[in-house]
Amino acid sequence: MKGPDGPGLLNLKEDTMKLTIRFELASKSTSELRALYRMIFNALSGATEPQERLNAVASLQNIRAELADRAPGF
């Protein structure tokens, strides 16, 4: 699955969910973060491997934290 900014959430070679870290998120706009959040949230429902699910949940937490740091009331 290709993300809005390039390779995306999935590693195309292994087809596994990639962990998105705060450093990567800092360079994205708020609208990009919200789109990425939505994509990861939707991909989480189809994740079958435990590590994929853990990476997705951790990525969602990182995005929420980044959004919360930017604007009060997220």
Image (cartoon, rainbow, N blue to C red):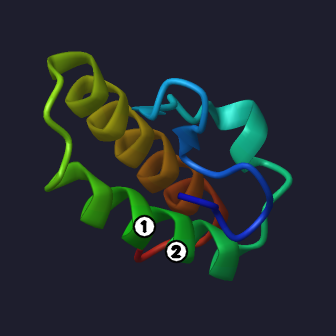
At 59% across and 72% down in the image, what residue appears?
Answer: 71
Residue pointed to by mark 2: 34
Residue 66 in picture, x, y percent from top left: 58, 51
User: Can you give x and y, in whole percent of width and height, for residue 8 in the image?
Assistant: 64, 52
- Image coords of residue 52 (percent x, y): 29, 28
Question: Looking at the rendering, in which quadrant would you find the C terminus?
Answer: bottom left
Residue 47, quarter of the rendered image: top left
Disc 2 marks which amino acid? Arg
Question: Going by the picture, which residue comes out furthest to the right?
Answer: 27
Residue shown at 77%/72% (left/top)? 29
Q: Amino acid at mark 1?
A: Met
Q: Horizontally, is 12 left or right of 54 in the view? A: right
Q: Position of residue 24 (x, y in %)?
A: 75, 39
Instruction: For mark 1, give the secondary structure.
Output: helix
Q: Can you name the residue that lies furthest to the front here?
A: 13
In the image, is residue 9 above or below residue 48?
A: below
Q: Position of 23 compared to 70: left or right?
A: right
Quickly name the residue at label 1. 39
The answer to whether 69 is drawn above or below residue 49 in the figure is below
Query: Front-most of 13 and 7?
Result: 13
Circle 2 packing at 10 Å, graded few (<14), some (14-19), many (20+), is some
Return the disc, 1 or 2, that comes first in the chain's sequence.
2
Callout 1–callout 2 Cβ contact below 8 Å = no
| Placement of 69 over or under 34, stated as above or below | above
